[in-house]
Amino acid sequence: MHADRVKVPVLLVQGEDDYTALATHGRAMAKALPQHGVRNVWCSSRAATTACGARICALLAANIGPH
């Protein structure tokens, strides 16, 4: 998985029905990154759009500034 190599904040957007990149892999990465001090947001295709959008905006604002 290499979460230990990541040094920047990460946005993970995952399709729940994707059979190439399984959603379980995305969730595992989202859990592993904070253990290495990396902020991340994980959103799936089944997540509430408004909640996911707010989390994405917060990640971006914290790392590149507000729009």
Image: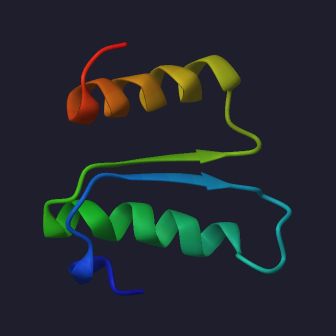
Question: Residue 35: horizontal and vertical position, in percent?
Answer: 19, 67
* Relative vertical location of residue 46 with respect to residue 24 in this rendering, above or below: above
Residue depicted at 26% across the width and 72% down the height: 6
Taking the image as shown, residue 22 lies to the left or right of residue 6, namely right
Residue depicted at 46% across the width and 71% down the height: 28
The quarter of the displayed image where residue 55 is located:
top left
Q: How is the image coloured?
A: rainbow
Question: Residue 58: horizontal and vertical position, in percent?
Answer: 35, 24
Residue depicted at 48% across the width and 20% down the height: 54
* Relative vertical location of residue 6 with respect to residue 17 in this rendering, above or below: below
Q: Name, please, the residue furthest toward the top.
A: 67
Q: Quadrant of the N terminus?
A: bottom left
The quarter of the displayed image where residue 38 is located:
bottom left
Q: Quadrant of the C terminus?
A: top left
Taking the image as shown, residue 16 lies to the left or right of residue 32, namely right
* Relative vertical location of residue 37 with respect to residue 45 in this rendering, above or below: below
Q: Name, please, the residue furthest toward the bottom.
A: 1
Residue depicted at 30% across the width and 15% down the height: 66
Query: Number of marks in the image?
Result: 0
The quarter of the displayed image where residue 43 is located:
top right
Taking the image as shown, residue 29 lies to the left or right of residue 2, namely right
Question: Residue 57: horizontal and vertical position, in percent?
Answer: 43, 23
* Relative vertical location of residue 31 with respect to residue 1 in this rendering, above or below: above
